[in-house]
Image: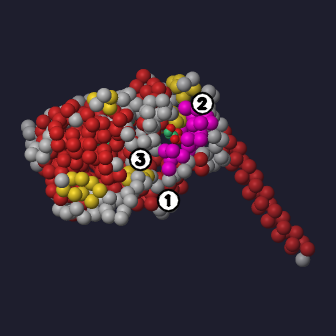
Amino acid sequence: MLLQFLSVLWETLSLWVFLVFLAILLLIADYKKRIRPRDFPPGPLPLPFLGNILDVDSKNPHFAVRKLAQKHGNVFSMQFGNMWLVIVNGLSLVKEGLIQQGENFVDRPKFPLTYEIFGPFGLVFSNGLIWKQQRRFALSTLRNFGLGKRSLEERIQEESRYLTDAIEAEKGQPFNPHFQINNAVSNIICSITFGDRFDYHDNHFQKLLQLLDETLHLHGNIWAQVYNSFPTLMKHLPGPHQTLLKNWRQMESFVREIIGKHKKDWNPSEPKDFIDAYLNEMAKESVASSFHEENLLYSTLDLFFAGTETTSTTLRWALLYMAIYPEVQARVQAEIDSVIGQSRLPAMDDRDRMPYTNAVVHEVQRISNILPLNVPRMTTTGTTLAGFHLPKGTVLVFNLTSVLFDKDEWETPDVFNPGHFLENGQFRKREAFLPFSAGKRVCLGEQLARVELFLFFTALLQKFTFQAPKDVTLNLDFRMGLTVSPQPYRICAFCR
Ligand code: HEM
Ligand SMILES: *[C@@H]1O[C@H](CO)[C@@H](O)[C@H](O)[C@H]1NC(C)=O
């Protein structure tokens, strides 16, 4: 009896001793990974196994770590999984990284989640030669198919007519403008890349837009971040990250289908859109060319999602701000009435004569801050920033929020104030206006987005006055995703 008891005790004890021993071993092995490299930016103490993941409030990541910047300065580091992340704050350091030292910070990190989806291909997440060739080609092709040319302006004008018709059909009743705006904006990049727009009642396309919306929203989910920290584990666990991956595959097959159609109808002497031009490029024989099926697929997908979500989100913020600041809306409308009137559509030539409207569009972009932490970058070589050493392969976040709300740059950073972009009634450019980022990897669609924002916004305010529905108070609550977008809202559009 006693012997039996002792042997059980010994077995349990030895199991415990073994487990404790194992835990200590793992801690020691883990400890080395938690030590900052030499001369690395300071930051909060990472926990064993977890790193600093608990230091981030996932609901509000772009404002959550203010305390850390206050404590550690404008450049500090944190750890996610085994990866160090360096955060850079304030206009002068962000500019040094993105512009002065542009070449050293031009790469994107290979985050497990985006790498699982895009691999090394396309425009947004690629590096090196692939990125250089794809970006150069996309820029020049976008230019040829309308960027900066009349035809693009006409396409947007035509689309804004469809959009205002669809909104007029709501007859001033409360409605959620999300998918009409999404569809209108998406149609511009679709007509450039796919050669065609989609009707607002096209169910197939509406489903795709909904899928895109859901998917980009899932990127703001905590599980997406956990996936990046522990990819091998998460790959085998169910959860929202699996939906996210499945959705991307679905969007891919949508694009694949369209590419298939282009191949069938391909006429090399008459490229009608981005995909046609790409097929021509693929047919050229050249050594070390990155123009192949996979880059075609992912570059097209990149243009589609980056060209839809961002501009649409900004316009949805714009309508919300107009309804909440009716005096600003009225001044924009007064300017529209005096410069354009009601008998014709707004055109890009009008912008120079409409400083107030231009300022409002800029201020909406500044304050809505839709990509608060920019898109992450990675050092291509060992370098120094603010006196700290950053080894090759260090992942960086150039904090755009810290620039767009920099207290030394803006008179009233936290207030919606078009005056930030006005001086003696004239439009005033601001150095700290960097919603598109800057440098070699600056947003590829910046020109396109600016034209779209001005023309759509002006066309909407020319036709409608936006107001909160009766007995509803609109608010500026946001929703985290790949971008920061407004919470779904309903609004009334009254014909003017
Ligand atoms: C309001 C609208 C938009 C905003 C605020 C915006 C913002 C940004 C930002 C901050 C980046 C990251 C730049 C960096 O790493 O430094 C980016 C990249 C990119 N944007 Fe935009 N964007 C907008 C519209 C568009 C449109 C309409 C397109 C479609 C052509 C587009 C295509 C891209 C692409 C392809 C990249 C990746 C560029 C690269 O990695 O080389 N964007 N955008
Ligand atoms: C980015 O800048 C904003 C504004 O200065 C700040 O509140 C936030 O904590 C910063 N985010 C990070 C990750 O440093």
Write down the residue under mark 1: 236
Q: Quadrant of residue 138?
A: top left
Magenta highlight range = 60-85
| Element assignment for label 2 | loop
Residue at image mark 2: 40
Viewer-closest of 396 and 326 = 326
Query: Where's the N terminus, which quadrant?
Result: bottom right
Instruction: Decide whether residue 329 is among the magenta residues.
Output: no
Q: Position of residue 54 (x, y in %)?
A: 60, 50
Callout 3 amino acid: Thr
Q: Nearer the viewer, residue 14 or 313?
A: 313
Q: Nearer the viewer, mark 2 or mark 1?
A: 2
Which mark is on residue 114?
3
Give whichever of 264, 152 is nearer the camera: 152
**Residue type pointed to by label 2:** Phe
Contact, mark 1 vs mark 3 (Cβ under 8 Å):
no
Judge: label 1 CB < 8 Å from ligand 2: no
Give the number of the mark in front: 1 or 3. Answer: 3
- For ligand 1, the image quadrant comes to top left
